[in-house]
Amino acid sequence: MTPDRWTRIEQLFHSALEQSASRRAEFLDAQCAGDAALRAGVRELLESHSPGDSIDDLASTLAADWLAQRAGSLVGSVIGNYRLLDWIGSGGMGNVYRALDLSLGRTVALKVLPPYLAADDRRVRQFLAEAQAAAILNHPNIATVYGLEQSPTNVFLAMEYVDGETLSQRIARGPIQPAEVIRVGLQVADALVEAHARGILHRDVKPANLMVTARGVVKLLDFGLARPSRTPPPGSATGTPAGTLDYMSPEQLLGWDPDERVDVFGLGVVLYEALSGRRPFEAPDRAETVARILEGRHPPLRELRQAIPRSLAAIVERCLERDRERRFQSVAQLRESLAAVDAVPSRQPNWVCLTLVAATSLGAGWLLGRGLRGDRPSIAGAPRGAASPPTATDP
Ligand SMILES: Nc1ncnc2c1ncn2[C@@H]1O[C@H](COP(=O)(O)OP(=O)(O)OP(=O)(O)O)[C@@H](O)[C@H]1O
Ligand SMILES: [Mg+2]
């Protein structure tokens, strides 16, 4: 589907929505003038539309399907100096492939921008500027950007290939143990501290942008490429807030100037989701998600999972404060608190166990006392003596 075609479908969709339901079929017949595919495209949008949906949601879903279908057909082809080996996934910026750098012989990840973005000069300049910013980052927890390249037909980003799974794939298998979440969180924090020290904000910290290797090394992806993170409908206006809705801070939603506290918030959402298996502000529709983020409404973490240490839950919830003045003021501060959490449950006092142990000791002490006093025939045959009540310090 070409960008022009998309724009036409989108225009007709809007116009059709303005018609009364009874006039819509007639309106489409007239506008599509025998173009059955065009009519089917608009129909599909109309059918999947419910009053709360925005055109962005619908177009995003359809465009993602379209990208994914198209993606497979490029495997095996050569783009610039790279042979595409496998299709890894699709996101808002296009398709990602495992590819072979034909000059250096190394495996890379190639993010190929969809044609409607590659055709937009302003967008390409923006990618270039952002890729340049990301390329100055050199850190073990950041996937290295090798470069943004252009061929006559494509614009693509070459970066370090990370052999592992995304944190979202990991979370899909269930919540993660607190100690492991802390290990992941510390590595993400290290990556962000480095970026912030160089004046770069991520703005789209989310599980799909975090990869974990088999050895447990975490790599943060998509530095500086957080805009736009959801597939925009071709030809749509720019200026949509940067970031992915469920992970966006209130200030991003409000369009305020972001600072590093945006990434504190994003990391907080990631930690919350990793610990509990659910996103703090998830809701049946986008409008409600926005309301929950702006009002700072989320279930307390320990209500979802009691095994989460109190100190860890408090740290995560502090990251999610809607007023950024009340959050950690830097990722470095957050990192320090995270590093101090004792996540090993056995070291947490467990009052039920302590009470049981104490009761057992008391009982044993009392029985032993009786035995030694000769209330019952004792093995030692010790003489009877005055009974003293067992105390908590008795062995
Ligand atoms: N450097 C990389 N190495 C290995 N796999 C990668 C790499 N970069 C991306 N991927 C894979 O490709 C998928 C798609 O990445 P992409 O960034 O396009 O989408 P996303 O993160 O899901 O969404 P968004 O467009 O909002 O960032 C990722 O979820 C990940 O599985
Ligand atoms: Mg991504």
Image: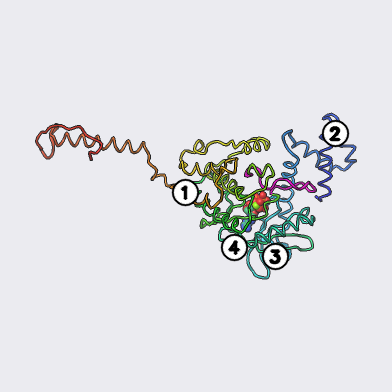
User: Is residue 330 visible from the viewing direction of this image?
Assistant: yes
* Residue 49, image quadrant: top right
Task: Tell me the kind of residue under disc 3.
Answer: Tyr
- For image coordinates 36% across by 36% down, the residue present is 352
Find out whether the residues at labels 2 and 1 contact each other: C-beta distance under 8 Å: no
Task: Tell me the kind of residue under disc 2.
Answer: Ala
Q: Which residue lies furthest to the front in this view?
A: 325
* Residue marked by disc 3: 82
Disc 4 is placed on an element classified as loop
* Residue 326, image quadrant: top right
Task: Tell me the kind of residue under disc 1.
Answer: Ala
Disc 1 from disc 4: Cα separation = 27 Å
* Residue marked by disc 4: 138
Disc 4 from disc 2: Cα separation = 57 Å
Q: Quick one: label 3 or label 1, which is nearer the N terminus? A: 3
Q: What stretch is highlighted in magenta?
A: 229-248
Q: Position of residue 359 (x, y in %)?
A: 28, 35
* Residue marked by disc 1: 179
